[in-house]
């Protein structure tokens, strides 16, 4: 045969290898996206709301808005 | 009576047709359409086509096919490749090769998007009327002030970016 022989290609187990690759990848990708969303979006949002409403005085807020003159029924 | 006469006519016609068929079957080539015969295809999902690629072998190719009937260790590498090329048109590597078609597609798509932009510019200039007065600068300023007074989206959105103590946008 010629000197530069090619590597013998993979002959069996092609579907199994493909499935393994994709199943593992699916788990990693979906869990990764979920974790990323939780820590980049959900947690900061919860913290922002908690910070706003921890010391929130709704009556003071209402008086400020009334003074600014946006209400039609409370001047 | 009439029916049997018709029958005999039909029978005569059938007989003559089959005689014709038999006459044609031997000598001349029966002209049947190429698309109706099994054909060769280069397809990844059909690796062993119905027929070989080369239909009519030359004299040397016929000799090679005869040599193929003997032990294959007698064949040289070039002969093996020649036998492969008789049977197949393109190898898998050749048929799977990429093209530069995507460049044409992307280029064409972007070109027509640009052309659409020109059309829209013309349309804004020659077709559309003036925009509503609510887009004037001082109207938008009054609108923004009113939104901040109402505290629109005070947690993460609009009013969250306004500093109510210093009366300016947060840095």
Image (cartoon, grey):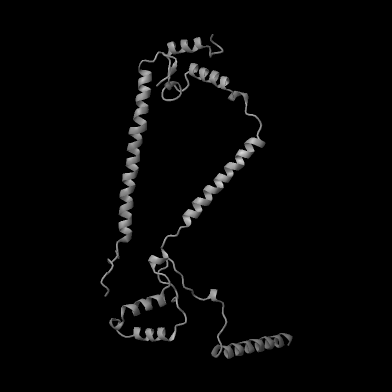
The quarter holding residue B76 reads bottom left
Residue drawn 40% across the image and 75% down it: B85
Left/right placement of residue A35 relative to residue B153 reads left
Residue drawn 45% across the image and 21% down it: B159
Residue drawn 34% across the image and 25% down it: A47
Image quadrant holding the N terminus of chain A, namely: bottom left
Vertical order, B51 against A7 (above or below): below
Left/right placement of residue B163 relative to residue B3 reads left
Residue B83, horizontal then vertical, whole percent: 37, 78
Vertical order, B54 against B151 (above or below): below
**Label total for image:** 0
Residue drawn 38% across the image and 65% down it: B93
In the foreground, A22 or B59: B59
The quarter holding residue B12 reads bottom right
Residue B162, horizontal then vertical, whole percent: 43, 19
Residue B59, horizontal then vertical, whole percent: 43, 86
Vertical order, B87 against B159 (above or below): below
Residue B69, horizontal then vertical, whole percent: 34, 85
In the foreground, A22 or B8: A22
Image quadrant holding the C terminus of chain A, namely: top right
């Amino acid at each position: 045969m010629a000197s530069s022989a090619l590597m013998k290609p993979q002959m069996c187990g092609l579907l199994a290898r493909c499935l393994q690759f994709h199943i593992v990848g699916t788990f990693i990708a979906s869990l990764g996206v979920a974790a990323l969303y939780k820590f980049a979006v959900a947690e900061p949002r919860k913290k922002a709301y908690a910070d706003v409403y921890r010391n929130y005085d709704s009556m003071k807020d209402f008086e400020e808005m009334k003074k600014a003159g946006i209400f039609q029924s409370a001047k | 009576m009439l029916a049997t006469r018709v029958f005999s006519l039909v029978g005569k016609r059938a007989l003559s047709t089959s005689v014709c068929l038999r006459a044609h079957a031997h000598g001349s080539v029966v002209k049947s359409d190429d698309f109706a015969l099994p054909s060769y295809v280069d397809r990844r999902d059909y690796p062993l086509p119905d027929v070989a690629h080369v239909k009519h072998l030359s004299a040397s190719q016929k000799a090679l096919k005869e040599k193929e009937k003997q032990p294959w260790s007698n064949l040289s590498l070039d002969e093996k490749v020649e036998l492969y090329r008789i049977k197949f048109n393109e190898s898998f590597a050749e048929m799977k090769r990429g093209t530069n078609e995507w460049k044409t597609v992307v280029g064409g798509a972007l070109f027509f998007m640009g052309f659409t932009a020109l059309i829209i510019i013309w349309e804004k200039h020659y077709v559309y009327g003036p925009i509503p007065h609510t887009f004037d600068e001082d109207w938008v300023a009054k609108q923004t002030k009113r939104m901040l007074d109402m505290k629109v989206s005070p947690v993460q959105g609009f009013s969250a970016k306004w500093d109510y103590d210093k009366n300016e946008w947060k840095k």
